[in-house]
Amino acid sequence: MLLLAMLSQQTWAAGARGAARSALAPVEGAMTSLAAQVDRLTSVLGDVASLRAENQRLRSADEQLRRQVVELNAAAKENDALRQALNFQKASGHRLVAAHVIGRGPDSFSRTMQIDRGTADGVQPGMAVATGAGLLGRVLEAGPHAAMVQTLGDPQSRVNVYLSKSNLQGTVSGGPSSLRLELQHTLGVTASTGDWALTSGVGGGFPRGLVVGEIASIAHRDTATFDEAQIAWVNDPASITFVLVITDYLPS
C-alpha cells in the first residue's frame, strides 16, 4: 500500500490518477448524496422524537391545567355558597345548623336529598331547610346523624306564599319540571312576571319571609277562581352541596 501510494504520486502517473478520479467521481458523488440523505433522515427522526416528547409534555401540562381549573371552579362555587349562607344567617336572624348533602333521592320524581346532620345536631322533622339563595324544603325524616330533606320540587310539597309587589296570596306546589303557583283572585289586583314569591307563614309550615322564587309566567282568566303561574325557583337541587337547617322554628 505504501509502494502504491508512492507510485501514484509520480508525475508519470498523473494520467492514471485523472482517469481513476473520473471513473470514481460518480461513485463518490452518489456516496456523498447518500450520506447527506442519511444525515437528513437521522435529523428528521431526531426531530420527530423530540416533537413527540414535547407533545407529550404539553399534553401533560394541559391536563394539569384543566384539573386545576376544575378544582378552582369547584372551590369558587363552594366559597360562593358559604358566603351566601353567611349573609342569609345574618339577615334571617334564625338559629341555623349547616349541613352537607351526602345523597339524593333514588329517582327524579321524589326530589329528596340526604344531609349529614340529624337529631344529635338539633335537627328535627318538619324544620325548614334553606340555602343562601332561599327556601329549599323541609326535613322529612331525621336520624341521629343524618336526615332526609323533602325539597320544594317534590310533588307532595306545599308552601304558602305571598307576592312582594302585589301582596297576593297563593300556594306553591312541586312537580317534575317546575314549581307551580296557584294565586287567589283579588278584585282589581293582578300578578305580573318578575314578582317575587316569599313564604307567608300562613298555616305555620314555614317562617315568614323566605324567598321561594320569581314568577316566570302567569295565566290569568277572569272566569277562574285562581290564576296559575310558573315559578323560577331560586334553588337548583341538582347543584346544591351545602344547606342550612332552621332549628329555632318548628311547624305548628
Image: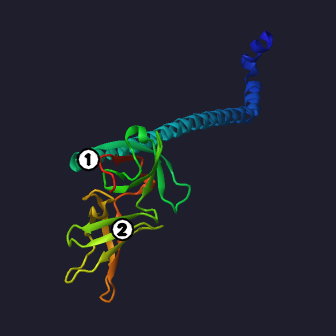
Q: Name the quadrant of the N terminus.
A: top right
Q: Is residue 117 visible to us here?
A: no
24 vs 64, left or right, is right
Residue 205 image point, x, y percent = 33, 59
Vertical order, 20 against 203 (above or below): above
Q: Is residue 13 visible?
A: yes
Q: Position of residue 60 (x, y in %)?
A: 52, 37
Q: Which mark is residue 217?
A: none
Q: In x, y percent, where is residue 175?
A: 45, 68
Q: Considering depth in this image, is 123 or 44 the residue closer to the camera?
A: 123
- Choose top left, top right, bottom left or bottom right for residue 106: bottom right
Q: In the structure shown, which secondary structural element does the residue marked by tag 2 occupy?
A: strand
Q: Tell me the residue that label 1 is attached to.
A: 94
User: What amino acid is found at the position of numbered circle 1 in the picture?
Assistant: His
Q: Residue 172 — which label?
A: 2
- Labels 2 and 1: the sequence-earlier one: 1
Where 98 falls versus 218 (above or below)?
above
Q: Secondary structure at mark 1?
A: loop
